[in-house]
Image (cartoon, rainbow, N blue to C red):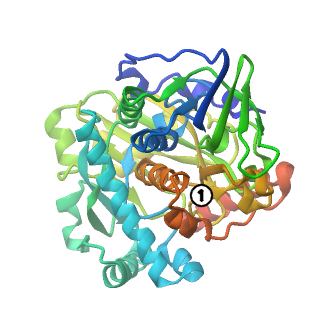
Amino acid sequence: MSLFTADQPLTTHSYYAATVQREQRFARLDGRVECDVAIVGAGLAGLSAAIELADRGFAVVVLEAREVGYGASGRNGGEALTGLGCDMSVIEAQLGRGDARGIWDMTLEAMALIHERCQRFAIDCDWRQGFLSLAVGERKARALAQWYETMRRDYGFEGTPIAPHEVTQWIASPRFHSGVHDPLSGHMHPLKYCLGLARAAASLGVRIFENSLVTTLAPGATAGARASLRTAQGEVVARHVLLAGNVYLEGIAPLLEKRIMPVGTYIVTSKPLAADLVRSLIPSQSAVCDTNFALDYFRTTPDHRVLYGGRVSYSTRTPRNLGRSMQARMVRTFPQLAGTAIEHAWGGFVDISMNRAPDFGRLSDLGAGPACANVYYLQGFSGHGLALTGLAGKVVAEAISGDAKRLDIFSRIRHRAFPGGRLLRMPALVLGMAYFRLKDLL
């Protein structure tokens, strides 16, 4: 089943869609066009790459199956975080401390890129600074304290540890034992940011086509030959191709599919509340995430709502009574919100890799043959895409421009296919998730 069909109902009650004005629409591709670089996917990764490539003088075309920001880029929790979806020890074990530190530093660069682009292109995305990572219980607290010390010592992390007796100064919740505050991370309205990037890309001469689902990718017959991307109504011929559709590539690159999985994540927002109450919940106005495997994440919004996410699902089925179940999770964290009405409830699919590390490279790296050396891909953001997509777009633009040093560091990270093949990998992950939920509870 197509993920476009599976998550259509999830887009209907999005707070982001309800609080943004789509001032710019893009036509459908009709006919044949030529360019230097063709990008599949008008999300954060594809648009970031388009901006970087346009700045370098490339003629760029972006093909989007639905509308700009349709996928995870316009529906996520809005938390822009330093680091990766996996622990840095995963990278260090494969690449060594030096390259792992280089990747960590690139995630800091990713945060800086958000601010640079917002300033350069006048993007108002409701940015707020700060992120709280909070532990539930002593066992999780010990693991978080150990992580903080390692990151401070080996990676120069400049966070603030929060002792048990200090927790109530940071969050008005009885649920948490201790935590760490990251001053560089933060949160935003992701759809406003994504639409701002599309406006920026278009202003630089990038041609964006919406409602233009790519049905076929045909690499050139020989290395360096131009590739072709076909839609129902047209074709783009390009010297280079970037696949930035993540779980929405709809079968045009089978080698990539088995390396990532679509994971459903679900979010609600309350109705507007009293400003004083909202400010009291998280005095620093930081974004928050617990450290459970099946985690909850939440924050407040400029219009005095609580935005609360969780209920991760490894199947493509939307949980029943989504608003009611998410409200119960919100009240478990903030009992003072009992009886608070939910106004928006939505979700969508993010892409995860087996080891939660980013998966960037060329199709030729995966055995597709030398003719695919000019077909690049960016995927596997594993919940850290809001910031990392910007860096990914810059790194792949550097490679297309002839400097592949940073892309090659990422492409050396080894990734395994999810077990079970197309039919069994999803049921296996559903069972695995149930196991980890039970561990969190115990």
Residue shown at 37% from the left, 49% from the top: 79
Task: In this rendered view, identify the residue nearer to me: 409 or 8.
Answer: 409
Residue holding disc 1: 360
Give the quarter of the figure containing the N terminus: top right
User: Residue 274 lies in what quarter of the image?
Assistant: top left
Dot 1 crowding, Cα within 10 Å, few <14, some 14–19, many 20+: many
In the depicted structure, whether residue 6 falls above or below residue 257: above
Percent position of residue 333, x then y: 36, 51
Tell me residue 21's x, y (percent). 36, 18
How many marks do you count on the picture? 1
- Residue 40 visible to the viewer: no
Q: Which of 130 and 375 is in front in this view?
A: 375
Q: In which quarter of the image is the C terminus?
A: bottom right
Q: Quadrant of residue 33?
A: top right
Measured as percent of width and height from the top left, residue 166 is found at 19, 69
92 lies above or below 253: below
Q: Can residue 278 be seen in this view?
A: yes
Q: In this view, does 435 lie to the left or right of 281?
A: right
| Residue depicted at 24% across the width and 45% down the height | 128
- Quadrant of residue 117 within the rendered picture: top left
Out of 99 and 10, give the one closest to the viewer: 99
Q: Is residue 346 above or below residue 162?
A: above
Q: Name the amino acid, label 1.
A: Phe
Q: Position of residue 372 (x, y in %)?
A: 74, 51
Is residue 105 rendered to the left or right of residue 408?
A: left
Indicate the secondary structure of the residue bearing disc 1: strand
Residue ID at (30%, 74%): 157
Q: Is residue 135 left or right of residue 324?
A: left
